[in-house]
RNA sequence: GGACCUGUGGUGCAGCUUGGAGUGCACGCCGGCCUGUCAAGCCGGAGGUCGCGGGUUCAAAUCCCGUCAGGUCCGCCA
């Protein structure tokens, strides 16, 4: 489904409509020839009005489910977006006037009595999907925008996903537990939203960046399978795929192995995808982090297409080509890419350099007498045996384009992984839906300015048992029991087995440079809890806004959020954020610094 | 904190390169006509601080500087 797709106003099939009640006997979109002759009442908004003289007019009435045409005797007093109730008789349209574009296109309402329930000013922008209205206008009048087919479809799809996830988690015995929104500051990770305390001036709550610690405490509390559709809040800069507040399927389980937790998550995600697209995705593949980097040059590989990274280092072990005297040489074969003009190849080279590569070697594979030849500015620096080995290893055919990067292993892989995506990756919402678990992430991801390892996930992540003894000597090589779920190249979420033993936790804190005192002051309540009987546990969190956007064919999560913020964190509808009154500030014990200049 | 793009009646655009009267298109809005339309059609009309401020110029929607708002991205998001 592409944005603004033509799937219809509602994702409801006949028979799936809720039973109409109150002022209406039916929803607009459910009327069919099967109701011919019945007197019905529908309620909705006037979508359009077509007058044909004093005594004939067509009134299109819209609710979330669709549009139905009402034939009325004059409609001059009715205007767009008036809220009306129409009572009339379901009648067949005269032959030749059916409208196949409408689900109700075979019928219309006759002998209509129209009640205006609410008059309306003209809408501030067109609700027609063909007009691409400025987003700030849509957000200022979000309550109007929500009536559009796009927003109705997206938010109903969102509800379908949440519902499927809840059903799947509960079917597996997970218990929904609500955790506090007013939480305690934990100066670590993302910036937190602060809430001043009225009762204790100078002290603050923060809004949780995730329910991470609360859910782990639930494990200590004996609720061995927890889940929550949880709001998370992070005061970081906004992006197309990031809002201040976002929604996660948050999960934690005790006495479970890593593959078991993954199976529960995968089942829930697969149910959600199935509920939306009507087809169950194939089972997720598994790949280690190291292999994902090696074969796809990324920790979130898109498995819908090949073009895997090819290891070429041995081919050039004895090379005289200076640019290839590097620890690793990797290449990709872009099938049929050999026709690219020189300017395109220069663009690719620039792209590789901007990603940190020293350069990019491109080679066009061309047919020649007695086999294949390589056309490249640097071909002359390679021996015949190197060239033929390269062609064979790459599986290259005439017309292909070979791209090679020589550098440190990880950099070479990541540059080519990005080029692979640039050249071959289909739009994310194009099926098939390929899930992959990326497992065995490193425990630490690089070092900070002081040479300290940085936690790749969070400091409670359990190291891989086989790597525990390497913790002191070679911390950067220690693998973690942490894992990501990736859908078509998008990271859906991540999780880990947590540390529940204080001796291991101390080692990790030590590696991170967190002293015992510091750990106690920051996470004391968690470490304290672990002294009172902590079960082995682990969990996961799925970012739902992204998942829903992908399933809705939207590139921006604002399109699947009812009331989102702009990139500067403002809400054009309410005007938030706004100053507090002096009285409010006094009550909170806050005083603002004088305004500059 | 930074880079780039955008800002013109209610909406969507063109005009900006190469300065010359708020010029144009489509939708919407208001009035009229119209008995089978469905983005109905036809006729008429109203509606503008060209985001805002400053500069250059005889003259600025157009060129320059600043600023605000929106978007995309980098940084940031354990």
Image (tube, coloured by chain):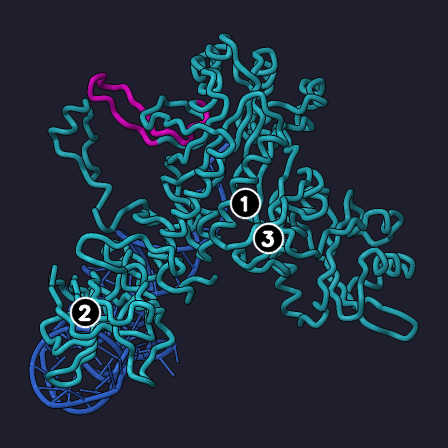
Chain colours: A cyan, B blue
Question: In the rendered picture of this protein, how many numbered marks are placed on residues?
Answer: 3
Q: Dot 1: what SS?
A: helix
Residue B32 figure quarter? bottom left
> How many residues crowd mark 1 within 10 Å: few (<14), some (14–19), many (20+)?
many
Give the residue at x 46% y 20%.
Answer: A223
Quadrant including the C terminus of chain A:
top left
Query: Given contact means CB atoms under 8 Å apart, are the residues at marks 2 and 1 in contact?
Result: no
Q: In the picture shown, does residue A240 fall above or below B34?
A: above
Question: What subunit carries mark 2?
Answer: A
Please tell me which of labels 3 and 1 falls first in the chain. 1
Query: Which x, y percent locates residue A577?
Result: 24, 41
> Residue A270, which numbered label?
1
Q: In the picture shown, does residue A145 fall above or below A491?
A: below
Query: Which x, y percent locates residue A346?
Result: 65, 64
Which residue has dot 2 on it?
Answer: A88
Please tell me which of labels 2 and 1 falls first in the chain. 2
| Distance from Cα at disc 2 to Cα at disc 3 | 66 Å
Query: Which x, y percent locates residue B15?
Result: 32, 79
Question: What subunit carries mark 3?
Answer: A
Q: Dot 2: what SS?
A: strand
| Distance from Cα at disc 2 to Cα at disc 1 | 44 Å
Please tell me which of labels 2 and 3 falls first in the chain. 2
Please tell me which residue lies in front, A273 or A395.
A273
Which residue has dot 3 on it?
Answer: A354
């Amino acid at each position: 489904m592409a944005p603004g797709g033509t799937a219809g106003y509602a994702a409801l099939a006949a028979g799936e409509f809720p039973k109409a009640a109150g002022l209406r006997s039916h929803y607009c979109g459910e009327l069919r020839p099967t109701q011919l002759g019945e007197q019905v009442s529908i309620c909705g908004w006037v979508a359009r009005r077509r007058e044909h003289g004093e005594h004939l007019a067509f009134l299109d009435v819209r609710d979330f489910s669709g549009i139905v045409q009402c034939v009325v005797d004059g409609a001059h007093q009715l205007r767009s977006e008036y809220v009306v109730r129409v009572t009339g008789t379901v009648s067949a349209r005269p032959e030749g006037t059916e409208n196949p574009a409408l689900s109700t296109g075979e019928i219309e309402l006759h002998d209509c009595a129209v009640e205006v329930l609410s008059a309306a000013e003209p809408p501030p922008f067109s609700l027609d999907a063909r007009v691409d209205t400025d987003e700030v206008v849509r957000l200022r009048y979000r309550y109007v925008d929500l009536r559009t087919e796009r927003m109705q479809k997206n938010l109903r799809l969102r509800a379908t996903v949440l519902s499927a996830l809840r059903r799947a988690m509960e079917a597996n015995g997970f218990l929904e537990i609500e955790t506090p929104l007013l939480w305690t500051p934990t100066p670590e990770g993302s910036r937190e939203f602060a809430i001043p305390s009225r009762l204790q001036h100078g002290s603050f709550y923060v809004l949780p960046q995730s329910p991470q610690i609360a859910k782990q405490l639930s494990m200590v509390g004996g609720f061995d399978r927890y889940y929550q559709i949880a709001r998370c809040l992070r005061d970081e800069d906004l992006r197309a795929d990031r809002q201040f507040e976002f929604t996660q399927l948050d999960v934690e389980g005790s006495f479970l192995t890593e593959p078991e937790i993954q199976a529960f998550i995968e089942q829930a995600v697969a149910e959600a995808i199935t509920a939306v697209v009507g087809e169950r995705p194939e089972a997720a593949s598994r790949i280690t982090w190291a292999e994902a980097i090696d074969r796809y040059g990324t920790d979130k590989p898109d498995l819908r297409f090949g073009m895997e990274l090819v290891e070429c280092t041995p081919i050039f072990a004895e090379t005289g080509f200076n640019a290839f005297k590097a620890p690793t040489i990797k290449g990709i074969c872009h099938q049929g890419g050999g026709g690219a003009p020189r300017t395109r190849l220069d663009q690719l080279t620039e792209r590789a350099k901007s990603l940190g590569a020293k350069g990019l070697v491109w080679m066009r594979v061309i047919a020649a007498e007695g086999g294949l030849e390589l056309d490249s500015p640097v071909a002359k620096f390679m021996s015949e045996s190197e060239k033929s080995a390269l062609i064979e290893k790459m599986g290259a055919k005439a017309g292909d384009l070979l791209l090679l990067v020589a550098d440190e292993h990880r950099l070479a892989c990541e540059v080519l992984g990005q080029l692979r995506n640039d050249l071959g990756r289909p739009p994310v919402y194009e099926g098939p839906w390929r899930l992959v678990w990326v497992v065995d992430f490193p425990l630490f991801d690089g070092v900070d300015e002081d040479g300290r390892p940085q936690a790749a996930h969070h400091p409670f992540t359990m190291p891989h048992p086989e790597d525990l003894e390497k913790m002191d000597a070679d911390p950067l090589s220690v693998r973690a029991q942490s894992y990501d779920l990736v859908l078509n190249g998008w990271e859906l979420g991540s999780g880990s087995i947590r540390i529940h033993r204080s001796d291991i936790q101390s080692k990790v804190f030590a590696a991170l440079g967190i002293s015992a005192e510091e750990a106690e002051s920051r996470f004391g309540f968690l470490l304290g809890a672990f002294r009172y009987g902590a079960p082995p546990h682990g969990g996961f969190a799925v970012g739902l806004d992204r998942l829903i956007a992908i399933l809705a064919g939207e590139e921006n999560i604002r399109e699947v959020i009812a009331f989102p913020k702009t990139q500067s964190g403002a809400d054009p509808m309410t005007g938030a954020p706004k100053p507090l009154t002096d009285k409010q500030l006094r009550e909170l014990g806050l005083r603002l610094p004088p305004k500059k200049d």
